[in-house]
Image (tube, rainbow, N blue to C red):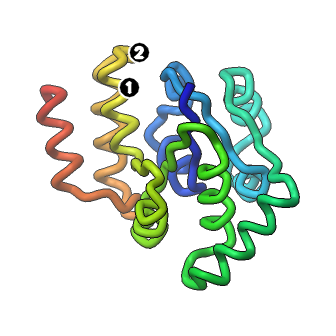
Amino acid sequence: MTSDLYRSQCLTDLKKGELLHVLLRLPYRFIVPLPIREEELLDFTAEEWQMLEDGGLTTYDLPGEEVERVFTLKREHSRLSANDCIILVTTICQENGILLTGDNLLRKVATARTVRVHGVLWIIDELHAADVCEVELLVSALQIWRADEAVFLPPAEIDKRLRGLGA
C-alpha cells in the first residue's frame, strides 16, 4: 500500500475543489503529520476532519528520532519551512511514500532524495483513472482552481486536463 502525504496547501486546494469526499476512494493510505493537521484546524471543521478520518486518513505523530531528522533537514535546507521538513521526513519514513505538494523548493529537495513527488493535478489524474467519481466533479474542481487566484496551478496544465476530460 502506498502512503500519500499532504502539504497543507494541497489539502486546502482539494477542499476548494470539493474533492475531499472522493479523495479517499483512491487506493492509497493518506497520512497527515500531526503538526500539519493542527495547523489546518483553522481551515477545516471538526465534521470535515471526521469525514476524512472515517474515510481512512491517518494522523501521524512523528517519533523522537524523526523529529531529530526534521531539525537536521531544516539546518541543511534553511529555506524550507518547518512544516515542509516535517512532511518530507514523514514521507521518507513511510514505505513507498509519495509526497503531495505544490511547493517547488520542497519538490526539488524531495526529488534529490529520490522521493516520489506529485501535486493536486496528479490527484485529478488518479481519480479519473480509478473511475471513482463523476467526470463533472473533476471538471468542476479544475474550473474552481483556475478561477481562484489563491490556487497556484499552471493554467496550461489545468486546460490540458480539462480538454482530456472533454470539457
Q: Position of residue 18 (x, y in %)?
A: 48, 34
The residue pinned by badge 2 equals 132
Q: Where is residue 31 in the image (x, y as percent from the top left)?
A: 66, 39
Which residue type carries mark 2? Val
Residues at circles 2 and 1 in contact by the CB criterion of under 8 Å: yes
Give the residue drawn at x 50%, y 44%.
98
Q: Earlier in the sequence, mark 2 or mark 1?
A: 1
Image quarter (top left, top right, bottom left or bottom right) of the C terminus: top left
Give the residue drawn at x 64%, y 73%.
73
Side (left or right) of 116 relative to 4: left
- Of 10 and 90, which appears nearest the observer? 90
* Inter-mark Cα distance, 2 to 1: 6 Å
Q: How many residues crowd around disc 1 within 10 Å: few (fewer than 14), some, or many (20 or more)?
A: many
The residue pinned by badge 1 equals 127
Side (left or right) of 124 relative to 40: left
Give the residue drawn at x 60%, y 55%.
8
Image quarter (top left, top right, bottom left or bottom right) of the N terminus: top right
